[in-house]
């Protein structure tokens, strides 16, 4: 047995010695090839120009400013659209072309031709049958400016087209469909909120838990409360409260489209009661039941009042709840501005109602809804950056 083991050991040693030169040569060739490939890669890298890298913070600022600028353009389009609606200018341009209409009529003959096209539609026949050419030019330029500013495409024209349709069974003032008006405004508000939110997300810095303007902390004095981080659970509740309040602001602004589309602001011009009653008799006069919430002017105005009251109540509650917490200075300023704008917007709405919807006051009220929505977005953006 021992002889067999010695023979096997000797055989293994012989095999190992036989393979050793081969292994050494294989390793040497692999190292040479690896060195050559490394030198080649370094040479190529040296000849290739280095790409210019832009700092991430600088890129965020550029994109953020561009997005905020886009949201500002949307604000201009919405405000101008509200004035167009209030001045009954929206149906003055009776056709839609993507490129052709970018240049308004230049000669007197072109104006006469455009005016004759307008005379063929219900708004002129029923409401403006005594309108002169100069008066037509005024409303035409209002609508032309709105289209050039917005240029949102088919949805705006789809809305306008609803006011140009003949309705022999109706003797009411020609107006656009409140459903299409709400869709048009809703798409603009969504676009505005998305661009503003992304812009603020890129521009606003994260809040620091320690204020650098304060004096250094001394062990001999108690720690100031504004140096502490807010409670995690309370901050989570505050953020949820703020999101719900922002959604309520959006819904209230969107309900204003139904008020404008049905001229519901001219139904009951009193506050807080509607006429002599808290709840009017014709609140649910339409059938089926759900039709009242979208087509009954009384119900639409009643709903807008309730939504407005709920919104200002929610904003007040949000502000009071935030007072119980330790928040950064910018967040406190945003919440205070939101509260002040909410009460100003309520005052504008009541004044618009009591004075029978004058155009300057109504346009300011419509613009106020955008200002309130902007401040709600700012509050959300600030709370998102509060450190837990």
Image (cartoon, rainbow, N blue to C red):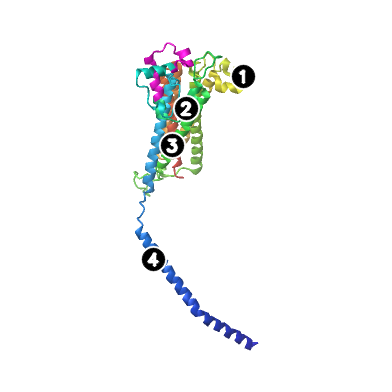
Mark 2 and mark 3: Cα distance apart in space: 20 Å
Residue 364: % across, % down:
41, 23
Q: Residues within 10 Å of mark 4 (few under 14, many from 20)?
A: few
The residue where tag 3 is placed is 195
| Disc 3 secondary structure class | helix
On residue 39, the disc is 4
Region of the chain picked out in magenta, as a range: 117-144
The quadrant in which residue 385 appears is: top left
Mark 1 and mark 2: Cα distance apart in space: 30 Å
Q: Earlier in the sequence, mark 2 or mark 4?
A: 4
- Decide whether residue 233 is among the magenta residues: no
Quadrant location, the N terminus: bottom right
Between 246 and 266, the one lying in front of the other is: 266
- Decide whether residue 140 is among the magenta residues: yes
| Disc 4 secondary structure class | helix
Q: Are marks 1 and 3 in contact (CB under 8 Å)?
A: no
Q: Earlier in the sequence, mark 1 or mark 3?
A: 3
| Disc 2 secondary structure class | helix
On residue 156, the disc is 2
Q: Residue at x 43, y 41 (%)?
A: 201
Badge nearest the viewer, 1 or 2: 2
Q: Residue furthest right?
A: 1
Mark 3 and mark 4: Cα distance apart in space: 49 Å
The residue where tag 1 is placed is 287
Q: Residues within 10 Å of mark 3 (few under 14, many from 20)?
A: many
């Amino acid at each position: 047995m021992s002889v067999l083991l010695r023979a096997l050991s000797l055989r293994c040693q012989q095999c190992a010695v036989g393979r050793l030169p081969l292994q050494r040569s294989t390793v040497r060739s692999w190292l040479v090839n690896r060195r050559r490939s490394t030198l080649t890669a370094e040479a190529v890298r040296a000849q290739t120009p280095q790409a210019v890298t832009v700092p991430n913070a600088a890129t965020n600022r550029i994109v953020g400013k561009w997005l905020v600028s886009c949201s500002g353009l949307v604000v201009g389009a919405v405000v101008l659209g509200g004035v167009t609606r209030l001045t009954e200018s929206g149906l003055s341009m009776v056709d839609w072309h993507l490129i052709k209409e970018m240049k308004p009529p230049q000669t007197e003959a072109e104006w006469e031709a455009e005016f004759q096209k307008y005379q063929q539609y219900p708004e002129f026949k029923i409401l403006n049958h005594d309108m002169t050419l100069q008066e037509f030019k005024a409303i035409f330029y209002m609508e032309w400016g709105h289209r050039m500013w917005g240029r949102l495409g088919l949805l705006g024209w789809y809305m306008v087209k609803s006011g140009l349709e003949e309705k022999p069974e109706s003797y009411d003032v020609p107006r656009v469909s409140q459903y299409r008006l709400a869709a048009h405004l809703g798409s603009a508000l969504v676009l505005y909120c998305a661009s503003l939110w992304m812009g603020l997300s890129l521009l606003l810095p994260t809040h620091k838990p320690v204020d650098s303007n304060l004096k250094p902390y001394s062990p001999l004095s108690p720690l100031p409360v504004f140096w502490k981080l807010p409670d995690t659970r309370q901050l989570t509740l505050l953020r949820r409260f703020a999101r719900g309040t922002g959604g309520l602001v959006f819904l209230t602004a969107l309900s204003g489209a139904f008020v404008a589309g049905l001229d519901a602001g001219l139904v009951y011009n009193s506050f807080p009661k509607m006429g002599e009653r808290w709840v009017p008799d014709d609140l649910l006069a339409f059938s089926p039941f759900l039709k009242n919430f979208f087509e009954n002017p009384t119900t639409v105005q009643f709903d807008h009042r309730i939504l407005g009251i709920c919104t200002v109540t929610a904003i007040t509650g949000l502000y009071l709840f935030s007072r119980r917490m330790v928040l950064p200075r910018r967040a406190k300023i945003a919440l205070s501005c939101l509260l002040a704008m909410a009460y100003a917007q309520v005052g504008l709405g009541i004044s618009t109602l009591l004075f029978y919807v004058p155009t300057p006051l109504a346009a300011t009220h419509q613009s106020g809804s955008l200002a309130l929505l902007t401040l709600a977005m700012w509050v959300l953006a600030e709370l998102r950056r509060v450190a837990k």
